[in-house]
Amino acid sequence: MSNNPYGPPGGRGYPPQPPGHGQGQPQQGHPQQGHPQQGHPQQGYPQQGQPQQGYPQQGYPQQGQPQQGYPQQGQPQQGYPQQGQPQQGYPQQGHPQHGYPQQGYGAPPAHGQPPGYGAPQYSAHPSPDLIGVDPHQTRRRVGLALWIAMMLIGIVLNIVFQILEIFGSKNPGRMFDSVLTGILCATLPLGFYLFVPAIIDRFDPEPWWSLTMAFLWGAVVATGFAGMINTLVHIGVADTFGKAAGEFITPVICAPLCEEFFKGLAVAGAFYFLRKEFDGIVDGIIYATFCAIGFAAVENISYYARSDVHNALAGTFFVRGILAPWGHPLYTSMTGIGFGLARESSKTWVRWLAPLGGYMVGVMLHATWNFVPTVIGEAFFYLLPLWFLFVFGFFGIIVALVVRKGRTIRTYLRDEVLLGYLSQDEVDLICSPVGRLKCTFSWRGGPGRDFIRAGARLALSKWHTVSAMKGQKRTISADFIIPMRAELKRLRGELMARMPR
């Protein structure tokens, strides 16, 4: 494979270079090596129509001098696409082909060449049809339909459980008041809980609607299905092996397995259906955290309501709402890390085993947290310092990953500056942790924030494409490069029109 990370010469959609081309005996009409003539190319200097190593050119023959194996102008040959006549198997200009970077990717010029050499011809004037185009709308629509269907089932399950909990208690009126108290205690801290992950991913924050979908999945779908399974397992085990066995099996084995599975489905859904937004480990953690916060909020309603009935609400709120509010986000983040590794890697075994491994680590952490108070309750408070140390260390890792993501965006926007699509000041704005704040409180406003997001999306799409090509894999990220560059150009023009004179 070529060392050029932006695309091998003679790649898909380009006529292959004939064997021995440029080697052996000189051809008729071409200068000899060491005898440059006026109007003839010299060795080491690429001429118009002659490909430079590492950069795929559109049609390799010299102007006016067709070579063997190449169609001449005006004389179409079998097997080659003609101008204005697309043939099967060849990507067309302006229309990205699935899985491969197209002309217009924006490879930087070779060393010693003037800026803009090898630059795409049509990327500076993208087709209006490409602006705002999502090449995978069908996949997203299927994901939305599944999300809606599961949400409806989850709503029904949660309503049934709340009714059973209220009317199954000894004092339904008292339990109803306690449920309202539990809702208040569970929802008040949500603003702070959601603010923390929202500000962590500064360089390419996820869309608010996708984070809302993850939050609602955890609050409605995961709680509904996990609650149903936990209840059925508890009843079955208690009836078969006794009440003690049911109280051990359900929290220590069943709950970690099924709760982490249904929360992990939110991350898996973002990984597959929201491929344009899901970039790697940081995004996996963010989606997992929002889903887990939604799950914990609804779960806490039941815990707070039951504690309030027994006049123990203060202690339960202190443990679940203050000391350990990041329990569920931490467990599910392990699954998010697994899917993030799968997104960043081009190795098949990593893409399959990393999500499974992350899920098992999350289950193990969840089971350990539930095991200690269930079996040896006295040791719970002695383990809290170790728990806090683990949580702080995990937050440190997240910060390091976010910084790494910012550096990746800057790296893959450098060639956009060389090609003249962005200025260095614009790259600095895109890569600034406070770039969105600058836009919000300046003349750039909303278009400025959209400009930053489009620049980050373009860089990350190129990052995934290069990673996939190194592993000789396909990636749908290549399909987003041309549309995102077109969107970036449109927003740049809008910002220039808004610039103070």
Image: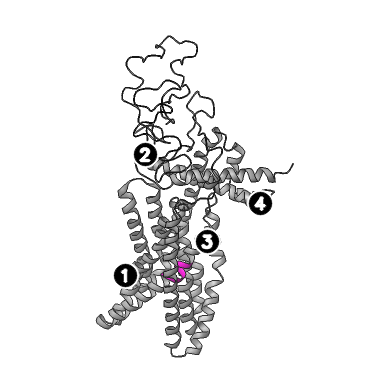
User: Residue 470 got which mark?
Assistant: 2
Badge 1: few (under 14), some or many (20 or more) residues near its Cα, within 10 Å? some
Is residue 389 or residue 146 the one in the foreground?
146
Query: Secondary structure of the magenta portion, mostly?
Result: helix
> Is 189 displayed left or right of 326 in the figure?
right
> What residue sits 51% from the left and 43% below the top?
409
Image position, residue 250 (x, y; %): 33, 74
What kind of element bears circle 2?
helix
Residues at circles 4 and 3 in contact by the CB criterion of under 8 Å: no
Tell me the quarter of the image containing the C terminus. top right
Inspect the image, locate mark 2, and give the three-letter code of the amino acid beneath it: Lys
Badge 4: few (under 14), some or many (20 or more) residues near its Cα, within 10 Å? some
Where 4 falls versus 468 (above or below)? above
Q: Earlier in the sequence, mark 3 or mark 2?
A: 3
Magenta segment includes 323: no
Inspect the image, locate mark 3, and give the three-letter code of the amino acid beneath it: Trp
Instruction: Answer yes or no: is residue 431 visible.
Output: no
Residue hosting label 3: 209
Where 496 falls versus 236 (above or below)? above
Is residue 440 or residue 308 the one in the foreground?
440
Residue hosting label 4: 445
